[in-house]
Structure formats: C-alpha cells, structure tokens
Image (cartoon, grey):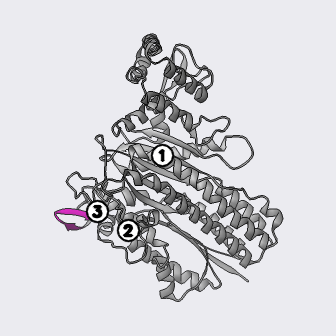
Amino acid sequence: MTQYAYLFEARGIQRFLFASGKLRDMLGGSELLDYLCADEGLLDQTLKSLGLRPAIVRKAGGSFYLLFERREDALRLRAVWRLACGSWLPGVEQIDALSEGHSAREAMDEGLKQLRKARNRLGADLPRPGPLSERSPRTGLAAVLREHDESLDAATARQRRFERPKGQNLAQRFLDKDGYLWPINFEEDAPASERFPLGERRLVGLLHADGNGLGELLRVLTEACKDADDATYINLYRTFSDGLSDATLAAARQACMVLLPHACDKVLPARPLVLGGDDLTILVRADLALPFAKAFLDAFETHSRSAMTRLHKAFEDKGLQDQAGLLPAYLTACAGLCYMKCSQPFQAGHELAEGLCKRAKVAARKVKGAGPIPATLALHKVQDSLLEDAETQFEQNYCVVQENRSWQFALPVYALKRVEGLPALEDLEHLLDVFGEGLNDRPLRELATLLHGNPGLARQAYLRWRELAQRTHAAKLTEFDNGLFELLGPVMSDLPFSQDEPRQTPLADLLSLLTVQERHQ
C-alpha cells in the first residue's frame, strides 16, 4: 500500500534564541522550541484538532517524521502546520518534505532526500520590511510593537509573552528536584533568586554537544528493513529515535549532578537552552563547564548502551539477527565549549561552539580502530571578537609562522578517553593540577607574545622559568614534563612544543583553563 511521508525541521533556531542577547528571551525561545514536539505540545494539538492519527516515526526537538495512508491527510497537515509553526516561532526557517512510496521505507528515503536538498536552499523572511519600518535596537529586525519604551520584533515579543501551558518545562526535564532554581537573568541588580551566579570575570561556558555515528546507524537500519513490512520499519525507527532521546535526556540529568554542590542559595550556576534528539546546548558557569561537559559525554555513552540494547532486541524480535550484529554496542558524542563573557553576543558564541563541535567530530572520525567513534571535545576561550568561525579563530589566535616553522599554541581537539592519535583530556587536567599546586604560570603567559616577535627571547624566558622551577618545585616540573610528553610525544628541550611539525603545545588551553578556574578558588 502506498505510504505518504511528511517530514519537518525547524532551522535557524540560533538566531531565534540568541538574537536579543538577553537570557530571559533565550529561555522563552527555548521553551517555545521545546514545546513544539513535546507530549501534548503544538504538534500533538494540531494533529488532534485535525482528527489525524499518523504513524510517528520520529518526534524530537524541532523536527518530526510522520507517515500517512492518505495523501489528502498529509496535505492538510502541511497546510495547517506551516501557518501554525510560523505563528508559534516567528522568524524560524521551516523546511519540510512531502513524499510517497510503495512502502514506509521508500517514502521516508525519498522524504529524507528532499530534506537534504531543502537544507541547502536559502529562504527569505516574508514580508520584507520597508525602509521606513522601525527596527528593534537589539536585533535589527522590524519592530511589531513597543513595550516598556522598547521596540520589539515579532520573535522577541513572542519569547517574552510565552508561558508554557502545562507539563514539564525544559529546565525541569534537566533536573526535577524540589528546592533548586534555574537563573533567568544576568543583570547584577536582578533578584538573587533569578540572577545567574557568576564569578568576578562574569565568564560562562557555552556548551554544544552532538551525537556521533548516527548516519551509519541509520544506514544499517534502512538496509535491514529493505524487505521488511511497514510496521517493522516504523517500530525499529521509532525505537532508535526514542532511545537516542532518552539517552540524551538521562545523560543531561546525570551531568546536572555536577552543578548541585555549587548552587548559590539554591540557584544553579547554569541554564539549559536546547535538549532534543542527540543535541544539547547549555550555559554553565565557566569553571564548571568542562566538568559538566565531561560528565555529559561520559553519561551519554553509558545510557546509549541501554538504548542500543533495546534496539538490538527489537531487531532480533523481528527476525533480523544478522543485521543486529552490525549495530554498535554504544554511541558517543562530541562537544564544543566556548568560554565567553556574559555580555558578549550569544548568537556568535553558539556558532563558535557549533564550529568547535564540528572540529571535534572531524578529528574523531579520523581515528582508526574498531568500535564506535571516540568522544572528543574542542574548547576555545574568546579573547576579544566573536565574529570569526572556529577555524579562523584558531588560526588567528593560536598559530604563527617563525623560523620557517608552524607553531600552534593550542591543541585542536582532546579525546575524553585515551585513543591513539589524539591527546587525552585527562592529561590536560593533570597539568592544571600541577600548576594549581605550586608552579608559576605567569612567565608562560609571555611566551606566545615573545615567540611572535623574537623566538630567541622566548627560549631564554622559558629556560629561566625552568631553572627557577627546578630550584623551588622540582617534582612539579617533572610532572609538567611528563604531562607534556603524554599530550605531545617528544618535546623540544628549549620550548614546550612538540618536536614534530607542526610544533604544537597545549599551553594556550592550559592557561585559559587556569584563568577560568582561579576566580573561584
């Protein structure tokens, strides 16, 4: 029997969430987006009002995949949903696909192809404002109303007026414990129960995490179902999608345990922004951002084992034992962590965090060996501008050519666990402990400047630092050398760089983390 698939994705959510730069607006946007596909949320209510009961293949975050037996029903939903979603999330790009096939798998395959093409097409914001239109000073978008002497665009006005109708909100899904509060404001004059607890430097870590190897897993699922009936395909796809969402949610909840001991008058030093499918975005106080990231990535691997076990059993129950053997035992995730001031533009910060996450994924895929792709993390502390992408930031801030050699003052990516070919995050943390217990990091902060101008002076400064450290903290200096060797392999004798090209050092990452931590000691 012919099946009809309707697939939808909300795109460009970063601009929607972060355009105004105010935390309160981001939270309203997060709730609007989360409610889109929540239980009894906008999608469920729309389907109920139309009297439709399609097969739900996927429903998570800002996307869903539905299967209909009648084309008319799919067309009705598409017409209504475009209007409903446009009103619900003004300014958010909508991409969708309506496809058909002789089976559920064929319809879905065709729909996914159409979605991939649609992602590459630029959409226009309509209607376009005229030259005399008033603009919102925060976003630059056309204003639709004035509130408290401020001109607001449609998206910001929607965020500020939204109150979640019922059910758990996004923050409660992260941590549903009585007595704890999530902050909603960065302003220093805000009430203590609403104010984000920051340190002196007012730094936060913007963390974006994303699952690995999902494309390969979906290819296994699609190949396994090439001769299966529609019920089997829908069941397996839904088992996979729900298991992935459950693993992400469970990992986020487990990682939140890192935050509890650091709550300030029960106000948690973090605020979740996105949680859906295999995606996580959260703002965390800077000194806790790396521990939270580690806890999430580790917990995601643990909880994904349960999801893969359920999927494996579902394959076997459908008589697909051979294909079940191709499934991974667990999944991993990669993350990008951007350290920034809370006054800097969060939209650019999120784009940087996404770029860092992409870099971590690319590096992880290059690791050779059996088993799933390793969990990796890339980090960057913003020095001044956020206008460049992750690769440009790395090249401008951490790379220099001197003496016909390329020098890199930071490492692009760290592995959560030890794998061949990537530096381990635990070795960087060990160096942090070494400096926290005696070694003076101030002379090392001058090395980058000196190496840019005069490599000879840089060598002299480093050797002087080593000479002093040898007299006062010899054991710690040995630990420092051992830590560099673990991260880099053979190290130069007169500079803390690798002997191989390009000459690399974790020095910038180390000093950034020391800066982040020292304000909370």
Report the magenta residues as a range. Answer: 145-152
Extreme residue in the bottom direction: 51
Q: Secondary structure at mark 2?
A: loop
Counting from the top left corner in percent of width and height, residue 186 is at 28, 53
Identity of the residue drawn at 55% across and 54% down: 210
Image depth: mark 3 or mark 2 in front? 2
In this rendering, position of residue 432 left or right of residue 328: left
Q: Position of residue 348 (x, y in %)?
A: 39, 48
Residue named by callout 1: 291
Task: Decide which of tag 1 and tag 2 comes sooner along the chain.
Answer: 2
> Most extreme residue toward the left, as rendered?
149
Q: Which residue is mark 2?
A: 90
- Residue 153 lies in what quarter of the image? bottom left
Q: What amino acid is labelled 3 in the image?
A: Ala
Left or right, 118 with reference to 443: right
Amino acid on which disc 2 is placed: Pro
Q: Secondary structure at mark 3?
A: loop
Q: Nearer the viewer, mark 1 or mark 3?
A: 1
The numbered mark at residue 10 is none
Where residue 423 sits, quadrant-wise, is top right
Disc 3 residue crowd, few under 14, some 14–19, many 20+, Cα 10 Å: many
Query: Where residue 49 sits: x, y (%)?
Result: 47, 87
Q: Is residue 395 visible?
A: no
Q: x%, y% of residue 500?
A: 62, 22
